[in-house]
Image (cartoon, rainbow, N blue to C red):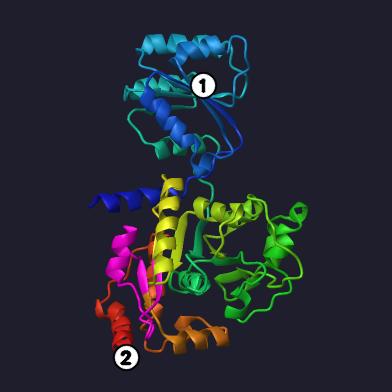
Amino acid sequence: MTDSMHEQLDSSHYAQIAPAPRISLQAFCETPDLAQLIGEAAIDRRMEKAHVKVNMGGAQAAIEAYRTSPTPNVIVLETSAARAELIEHLEALAEFCDSGTKVIVIGQLNDITLYRELISRGVSDYLVKPFGVMDFIAALSAQYHQESAAPLGRVIAVTGCKGGVGASCVAHNLAWAISRELDASTVIVDLDLPFGTAGLDFNQDPPQGIAEAVFAPDRLDANLVDRLLSKCSDKLSILAAPATVERSYDFQETTFDALLELLRATTPYIVLDVPHMWTGWSRRMMVTADEALLVSAPDLAGLRNTKSLLDTLRAARKNDPVPRFVLNGVGMPKRPEIAVADFARAVEAQPLAVTPFDAKLFGAASNNGQMIAELDEGEKVAPIFGDIARAVTGRAPIKRERKSFLEPLLAVLKG
């Protein structure tokens, strides 16, 4: 198994970690490497509500600190002490701990007897070094979320690297493929409030949609969201944009957070159709999603913007799956294009998929309010969206002959 496959497996597992609640956490470390690890964990998207402070000095420093100060919600202690000395430190710390404070001990002894003794003395968890950033976040999350709780919905954010590259088309067909081919309940959230096309693409004209959710946050709850969803099929619903310019749509960075939390609690897959812009809230959607998918075109502007977005998202999503991109509309007649191999080399990443230019097929689907799979009788393009769906959901890919992927592209290029 390759290193990249290990990364994908780990990322899929960690995607189900629930965010930490609004807590205060103070760590007392003995080694710089653990202090650095907790510092990196503190800037992860799952820890944004937690207030984290890292101190040096281990258990002894914690005892001195809390002689005169109240304890936080969580204390993390790193120790290299022997069992007897560790127990002595914990007994001393217990004299100053407030009721409800959780204590997580980090040590080097993989000793089940020690673990049981610590738990019996009220320690919340015992972690054995070495471990990674996400292991620490998972251990902290587990203190506040039951393992038996329903898994969180997976958020897949899709945006275009420039205007007119068909990002909404990819997002909508991706959601369709997840709901149909993977038989999973899916919601499309159209975040392009003034010009969104989710309603048009699914031949829907809902009287209400996402605007009612974001402009009345005091009324927002699961029942309201359920009423605002427009069903396209048994497994697919859309939260449509009003697509009107009667008002301005200036949002705060966290405007959509409450809505997404409600959707994640009830829906396995949420596909965000993020418009081509770079504001505080749109950046937040791409950075905090479980999967970030870019859609680009094989031209110079597309290459430049793809490279810029990939670099930015990689840096901001260090503990998440690497962002991926789709090259859309490849092979447009008479248009000079950057070769796929050259494009990939320049952005230092391989495209997740390459969809061919087919004006007749995509135009008919758009005008009829249908998905590509409903019109692609030869099944030349629709399977590509199924492959994308399996990739971003972590499902196993379908084995196909290579010609099923390359044939439509080659046919267009020859034509």
Is 239 or 99 nearer to us in this picture? 239
Residue hosting label 1: 122
Q: Quadrant of residue 401?
A: bottom left
Q: Magenta residues, as a range? A: 326-354
Figure check: 301 above or below 4: below
Figure check: 253 above or below 368: above
Which quarter shows the C terminus? bottom left
* Number of other residues with Cα within 10 Å of mark 2, as a class: few under 14, some 14 to 19, many 20 or more: few
Where is residue 157 shown, x and y percent of the image?
51, 60
Figure check: 18 above or below 115: below
Please tell me which of labels 1 and 2 falls first in the chain: 1
Query: Which label number is shown at residue 415?
Result: 2
Q: Residue sitting at 34 percent across and 28 percent down?
A: 129
Where is residue 86 shown, x and y percent of the image?
41, 13
Q: Residue sitting at 76 percent across and 66 percent down?
A: 247
Amino acid type for the residue under numbered disc 1: Gly
Q: Is residue 280 left or right of residue 365?
A: right
Q: Quadrant of residue 193?
A: bottom right
Q: CA distance from mark 1 to mark 2?
A: 72 Å
Query: Which label number is shown at residue 291?
Result: none
Residue 345 among magenta residues: yes
Where is residue 406 shown, x and y percent of the image?
28, 79
Residue 50, visible in the rendered structure: yes
Is 92 or 303 nearer to us in this picture? 303
